[in-house]
Amino acid sequence: MNASPALTALLEASAQRKLMPFLGAGFSKNVSREMPSWHQLIGDAAQRLGYNGLILQAQADQYQIAEYLDIKKELGGFYNDLNRSFHDSKYRVQDSAVHEALCRLDAENVFTTNWDDWIEKAFQHYKIPCHKVVGVDGLINPKLIASHGAVAPAHKRFRETTVIKFHGDFSEHSSLVFKETNYHERLDFRHPLDTKLLAEALCRSVLFIGYSFTDKNIRYIWHRLREARKSVHPSRRPRSFFATFADNELQRAVFVEMDIETIVLDPADPDNNLAALFGEILKAQGA
């Protein structure tokens, strides 16, 4: 990979075990590019409601559509359909080199907004110790979701990684953040997972992958984080990173103001280039 100041800073944070991955929907696509997109999912929701998908999306955003599904008593069935779509038996986690690399990364916590369990499946497949946190009970009693096999060679500081399902998990429909009311409740900033993310991000470098940064809840939390960091000199604040395949000058400039550096990957071969980034990160950790 081409060296850059942002990449150098990322590798330094990784070597110091101060890197915290935050994974969005695009990360699951590394298992299979055939996985459904959000546009497809909203189209499925429209069908369930008897609407044309394009018309429905023109009339309301995804949060309002989810609210309407709930009003029509269709939300639970929709979640079950999504679960089956994301976990089709034709998908295999071992096909994703970046999922394996994530498991071998010496990280104490991994946050994800994904509802699927491909991250946990990867830890199980490679027999690397991992816990899963979905809600408050999980923070107190993390659920072991991977067999205790041999600790990955890179795991020298953190024996186990905790996967924090920031927006819930299909195993608990009540935990899923999808409806408009879910987002409004989270904007109160009183949920323990919001507090957990803020506490971790204050002292660690966050690496955003597979994420568009359009989520209203996350952007609000990052605003709160910036407010909390104001008393710390900029040179002493942890730098965070946004890995993307699109070099957007506007987004890059806005992110710099938010203490986030952009790392642009070659879109010609997304899977291999993301795997190469993880390879550099693991190398920095001495793996």
Image: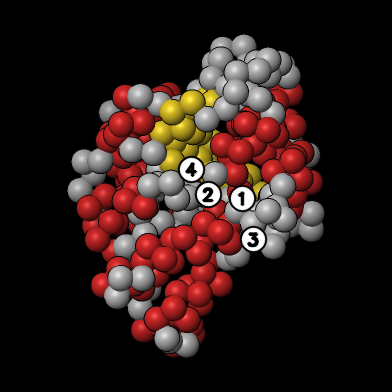
**Other-residue count near label 1 (Cα within 10 Å), few / some / many at <14 / 14–19 / ≥20:** many
Query: Considering the numbered disc 2 on the image, is that residue within a helix, a strand or a loop?
Result: loop
Residue type for callout 3: Met
- Residue that carries the numbered disc 3 in the rendered image: 35
Asked if disc 1 and disc 3 are in contact, CB closer than 8 Å, the reply is yes
Asked if disc 4 and disc 2 are in contact, CB closer than 8 Å, the reply is no
Residue positioned 47% across, 38% down in the render: 111
Query: Considering the numbered disc 1 on the image, is that residue within a helix, a strand or a loop?
Result: helix
Closer to us: 127 or 66: 127
Residue type for callout 2: Asp
Residue type for callout 1: Ser
**Gap in angstroms between the C-alphas marked 4 and 1:** 10 Å
In the displayed structure, would residue 127 be above or below residue 164?
A: above
* Sequence-first tag of 4 and 1: 1
Query: What percent of the width, then of the height, locates residue 115?
Result: 47, 50
**Gap in angstroms between the C-alphas marked 4 and 2:** 10 Å
Query: Considering the numbered disc 4 on the image, is that residue within a helix, a strand or a loop?
Result: strand
* Sequence-first tag of 1 and 2: 1
- Residue that carries the numbered disc 2 in the rendered image: 116
Mark 1 vs mark 2: in front: 2
**Gap in angstroms between the C-alphas marked 1 and 2:** 8 Å
